[in-house]
Image: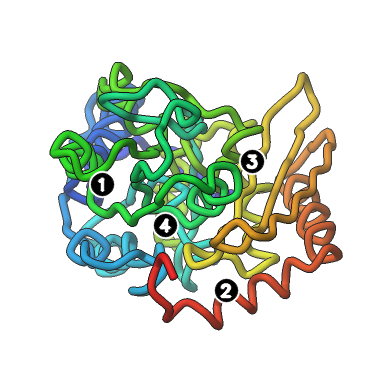
Amino acid sequence: MQTEVLSSQPPKQLVIASRESRLAMWQAEHVQVALQKLYPSCDVSILGMTTRGDQILDRTLSKVGGKGLFVKELEAALEDGHADLAVHSLKDVPMDLPPGFALAAVLSREDPRDAFVSNQFESLDALPSGSVVGTSSLRREALLRARYPQLRVQPLRGNLDTRLRKLDAGDYAAIILAAAGLKRLGLADRIRTVLEPEVSLPAAGQGALGIEIASARGDVAGWLAPLHDVRTAYAVSAERAVSRALAGGCEVPLAAYADWHGERLLLRGFVAMPDGSRILRAEACTTPTSEAAADALGLEVAEALAEQGAHEIVRAVRGDVARPENA
């Protein structure tokens, strides 16, 4: 992920491109503070931007172009020189970046798990039959439909605060969110239950922050190098390799989660039909010594899923994306 060219001179000025949601700005400010500690004389500023993904709230991402809608405007700012780096939640970053861009650093991971949020109920098991559960993720939807067929799963778009307001307005009995976002914004008390990976396997990159740059900016890559967390980078690299190999995107219910057990990295993955009628699972473990080894672990899990019929599911789902969300 990192460019080998390092800069011997500290930066005088750095501009961070960020979405303008409260969570995205927290993430950008988190990197801003880290860079200011590294380079006290540097002027580190944030360029707030609105992306198409933020503007289109009446349809699910799988219907309007996918995760790339959250990064294209930020990449334009990198390309034209208005910004030096962009901070992303890695689960929102497409598995293949456009030519001319690179992930220069991956920061230490926050809690990667999903969180159950409700004002009335303590857990998914406590929800009465027919309760409406909101989620923006086909991955979560498939798991909910398979494990809790008595519940009604409805789409939930908007930034984190908007989703919480919809819950508080009574539109949903419960919603499922990423625990990391709630914790980063000081909203951990809204979490009723954290869903363990055995119940809700996280999305590739969930809980991790990635810093994107123009690939020609070796100077910026060098300045960002101290922020790079190797163990997190290996884990998310393995996860993203699964999704990349299976051509996964937000229109395909796919999960990939790697966690460390000492020096061993355990990677688990699944591919599912959106209605939960079929879920394929696979896992593998290795001791990675490079990002290439982590990628190879991801390919191993992807191949195991493919042998079970993952590509058939991907083709079926992509041929069905025009149907209503809950058809």
Which three-letter amino acid code belongs to the residue tagged 2? Val
The label number, if any, that marks residue 16 in the structure image: 1
Question: How dense is the environment of label 3, judged by Cα within 10 Å: few (below 14), some, or many (20 and up)?
Answer: many
Q: Secondary structure at mark 3?
A: strand
Which three-letter amino acid code belongs to the residue tagged 4? Arg
Residue found at x 28% / y 67%: 59
Q: Which residue is mark 4?
A: 217
Q: Nearer the viewer, mark 2 or mark 3?
A: 2
Mark 1 or 3, nearer chain start: 1
Question: How dense is the environment of label 1, judged by Cα within 10 Å: few (below 14), some, or many (20 and up)?
Answer: many
Look at the picture and state if 47 lies above or below 64: above
Which three-letter amino acid code belongs to the residue tagged 1? Ile
Instruction: Judge left or right: residue 267 versus residue 162.
Output: right
Which three-letter amino acid code belongs to the residue tagged 3? Tyr
Q: Which residue is mark 3?
A: 257
Residue found at x 21% / y 62%: 57
Q: Nearer the viewer, mark 1 or mark 3?
A: 3
Question: How dense is the environment of label 4, judged by Cα within 10 Å: few (below 14), some, or many (20 and up)?
Answer: some
Question: In whole angstroms, how far apart are the C-alphas of marks 2 and 4?
Answer: 38 Å
Mark 2 or 4, nearer chain start: 4
Q: Which residue is mark 2?
A: 317
